[in-house]
Image: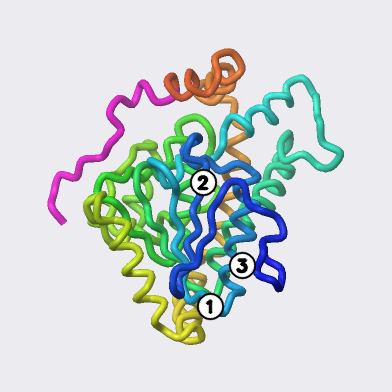
Amino acid sequence: MQDYSGKWLKQPQCLLFEVVGAVAQITLNRPEKRNALSHQLIFELRDALLEADDRQDVNAVLLQGAGKDFCAGYDLTSSYEQTLGEDSGASNFDYRPSYGTFDNDCWGMERFQAIPDIILSMHKPVIAKVHGNCLAGGTDLALRCDMIVAAEDAKFGFPAIRANGSPPSHMWTYHVGPQWAKRLLLTGDVILGRDAAKIGLVLDAVPAEEIDVFAMDLAKRVALVDPELAAAQKRIVNIAMDQMGMSDVQRFAREMDARAHLGTGPARMRFKSDMREGGLKQALTNRDGPFGDSVIKLRVDR
């Protein structure tokens, strides 16, 4: 956040914030970690989103990622470093942990997911510009945005459903309907940007070399509308989705993710064992290996 002098009270370490015309560019900036969502990045994202919504010189927000990816998911290394300690009963928390029981897990996710939920409650429209990987937690961010534009070769999916849990934010059905939501979430397969546009998961897809200009042009066009009018249109559409149960579904999705975390199926237990003994790379290799090529190839031209 900024003080009245326009200076950041605490310089962000994991993201970049820049105002271009009437567009606030918020850039996830952990390229060496493929912009994986650490707690620090999420907290800095909260401040940046609120900053953009507060500023009178900003009419629209463009959310993007630095480096090769938009966001490859949640930072599993830091997450599992915390939760693997539960087997021994060890805890470094002075306050309530976000694991160990169903209610603790629900509580932790409700607190954590309330931050990206700001995207939905903001008055300013937010456009996600997706390139590279947009996986797991990356989709939790992108699918909350008011519009998503993507590079044709971008990859969308939630492979974590294979061993780790369920999306704690469920916007899938609202974008693509029940069958495609199930196709993606029952396999953990990924879909390319060009096909994601065909099924409605994203607004549009363009060649990778054109995505920067395309996304900024769209954001600038949206920013031409008076913010009071833009806020009204956004709220109307979001209320319409609420009438279709959107807010209740998000709460239910977090409870189902907590339920999944308590599972003792072989895939989940193997992932935890692999994390403990071989680290994240080995765990992901063993989790995803049986699925082979996970890219969905559409059989018909839409």
- Main SS, magenta region, reads loop
Q: Residue at coordinates 73% horizontally, 34% vertically from top-left? A: 100
Q: Residue at coordinates 51% horizontally, 75% vertically from top-left? A: 58
Q: Residues within 10 Å of mark 1 (few under 14, many from 20)?
A: some
Mark 2, residue position = 29
User: Earlier along the polypeptide chain: callout 2 or callout 1?
Assistant: 2
Determine the image quadrant of residue 85: top right
231, above or below 165, in the image: below
216, above or below 279, in the image: below
Separation of residues labelled 2 and 3 (CA atoms)? 17 Å
Q: Which mark is residue 51?
A: 3
Mark 1, residue position = 57
Of all residues, the one furthest to the right in this rendering is: 94
* Residue 37 picture location, percent across and down: 56, 43
Element type where label 2 sits in the image:
loop
The three-letter amino acid code for the residue at tag 1 is Asp
186, above or below 202, in the image: above
Query: Is the Cβ of the residue at disc 2 closer than 8 Å to that at disc 1?
Result: no
Q: Which residues are magenta?
A: 287-302
* Residue 2 picture location, percent across and down: 67, 66
The three-letter amino acid code for the residue at tag 3 is Glu
User: Earlier along the polypeptide chain: callout 2 or callout 3?
Assistant: 2
